């Protein structure tokens, strides 16, 4: 048969549908406006038949819903199924290119996404509706007798296949529309969850009170436990597209390495390829936590700055601040995969203001602060070793594997460059030497002229 004849057979078949039940039992579950939208172009009898079949499908689906019935009201389920059956029957006689969803169907898809339920559960119910619908249509097709001069034999032979194809398309288009709504709502849920998580983290970092139940719900951790903050980042200027996902994987590896009871991972707003992570344990962290993290992150492309473990809400904040300090020190020139705050706490404190740290090194090391000079680097190493050994010539010589007289000679050169005795201001010189050794070129400047004293008259001036 040609397409025109096929359309005529389908229209005649739908017009021959027997209608529904009279009285309250035959009343549609949907509002009149929604019934009209789903059944536009259908004869009244076909609408009644679809409403009755929709009730039958709803009963079957509700029977197998089980625990899902707790989050999806029964009347909403009935309306959604009835709308689907009406739409499917309408597809037999109307060329519908865009498959519409009713408000109840959209609501069901959104609720599933918000509850974290797989959309396959909806598909099971939809498939059940399709099977019942096809069975009912085939029963009607067996009783159908074409009228208005249509060829009885051709129409009856062609109709079952056409009905099977139509219900199959109904399932595919319904599924596509539902999945689209489900995925869109899932993305919105993820965005809302991330925003809620960021708000909670921001409140904790600001020192605000956050109730334990709120932290547990939004962050998945218990605030009263022990926390360790980690900053993760990659050194690549143009990281691959999957870098963010790899950052989350690195955070999970770090948590597993320390046997965490939970962890929070969020992206750093200031860096597209940096992440913040808090690892939480019910008991204090092991003393070798930096080594464990180094092993866990050895295979990846990411570096880590690790804060100081601390308990409670204040510890959550304190560990973060320490991790940021360790990150700053690491980015200023420290080598290594993992930088632990406990190993760089003094350096981090002294470099809180990088410009002033550079001034500090220049002021206290003078000409000894020149960079790109191997001999001066050796002298700085000797001076640092001498101060760390308690100004012992013997210990310094042993540590450097040189003769005692070599140490004496170097100390003389050091003091000439400093313009004073090395022990005259040991704390400041020791700190400056430690900064120069750990951070090197980041703090050593070709121009090592000590900074001028501030002109107090200028500092006190009032400008108009």
Image (tube, helix red, strand yellow):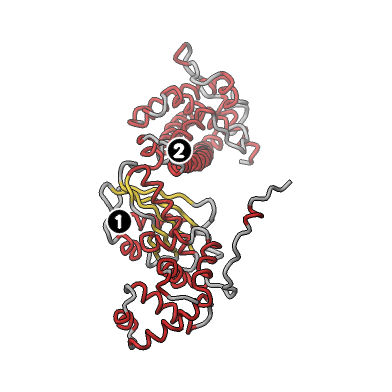
Secondary structure under the numbered disc 1 in the rendered image: loop
Q: What is the quadrant of the N terminus in the image?
A: top right
Does the rendering let one see residue 114? yes
Which residue is at 55% across, 65% downward?
Answer: 237
Report x, y in % for residue 275: 46, 54
Secondary structure under the numbered disc 2 in the rendered image: helix
Which residue is at 48% across, 68% downward?
Answer: 333
Report x, y in % for residue 163: 51, 36
Does the rendering let one see residue 175? no
Find disc 2 in the rendering and name its residue: 113
Report x, y in % for residue 220: 36, 42
The image quarter containing residue 34 is top right
Q: How many marks?
A: 2
* Image position of 10 with respect to 31: above or below: below
Among numbered discs 1 and 2, the one appearing first in the sequence: 2
Find disc 1 in the rendering and name its residue: 258
Position of 452 with respect to 433 (left or right) is right
């Amino acid at each position: 048969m040609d397409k025109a004849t096929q359309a005529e057979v389908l229209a005649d078949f739908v017009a021959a549908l027997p209608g529904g039940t009279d009285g309250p039992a035959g009343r549609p579950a949907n509002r009149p406006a929604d019934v009209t939208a789903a059944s536009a172009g259908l004869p009244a009898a076909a609408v009644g038949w679809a409403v009755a079949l929709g009730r039958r499908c709803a009963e079957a689906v509700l029977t197998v819903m089980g625990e899902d019935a707790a989050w999806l009201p029964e009347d909403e389920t009935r309306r959604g199924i009835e709308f689907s059956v009406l739409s499917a029957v309408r597809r037999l006689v109307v060329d519908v290119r865009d498959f519409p969803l009713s408000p109840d169907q959209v609501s069901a898809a959104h609720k599933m996404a918000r509850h974290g339920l797989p959309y396959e559960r909806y598909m099971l119910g939809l498939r059940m509706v399709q099977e019942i619908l096809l069975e009912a249509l085939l029963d009607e097709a067996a009783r159908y007798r074409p009228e208005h001069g249509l060829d009885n034999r051709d129409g009856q032979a062609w109709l079952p296949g056409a009905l099977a194809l139509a219900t199959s398309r109904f399932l595919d288009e319904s599924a596509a529309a539902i999945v689209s709504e489900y995925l869109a709502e899932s993305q919105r849920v993820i965005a809302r969850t991330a925003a809620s998580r960021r708000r909670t983290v921001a409140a904790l970092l600001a020192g605000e009170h956050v109730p334990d139940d709120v932290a547990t719900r939004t962050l998945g951790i218990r605030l009263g436990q022990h926390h360790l903050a980690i900053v993760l980042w990659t050194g690549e200027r143009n990281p691959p597209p999957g870098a963010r996902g790899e950052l989350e994987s690195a955070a999970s590896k770090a948590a597993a390495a320390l046997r965490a009871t939970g962890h929070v991972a969020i992206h750093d707003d200031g860096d597209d390829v940096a992440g913040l992570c808090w690892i939480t344990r019910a008991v204090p962290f092991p003393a070798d936590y930096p080594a464990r993290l180094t092993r866990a992150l050895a295979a990846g492309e990411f570096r880590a700055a690790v804060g100081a473990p601390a308990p409670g809400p204040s510890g959550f904040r304190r560990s973060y601040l320490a991790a940021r300090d360790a990150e700053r020190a690491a980015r200023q020139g420290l080598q290594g995969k993992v930088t632990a705050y406990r190993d760089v706490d003094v350096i981090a404190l002294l470099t809180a203001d990088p410009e002033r740290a550079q001034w500090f090194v220049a002021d206290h090391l003078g000409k000894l602060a020149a960079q790109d000079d191997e001999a001066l680097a050796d002298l700085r190493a000797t001076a640092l070793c001498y101060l760390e050994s308690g100004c012992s010539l013997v210990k310094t010589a042993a540590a450097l594997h040189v003769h005692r007289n070599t140490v004496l000679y170097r100390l003389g050169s050091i003091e000439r460059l400093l313009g004073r005795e090395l022990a005259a201001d040991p704390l400041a010189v020791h700190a400056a030497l430690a900064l120069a050794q750990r951070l090197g070129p980041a703090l050593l400047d070709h121009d090592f002229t000590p900074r001028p004293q501030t002109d107090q008259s200028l500092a006190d001036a009032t400008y108009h």
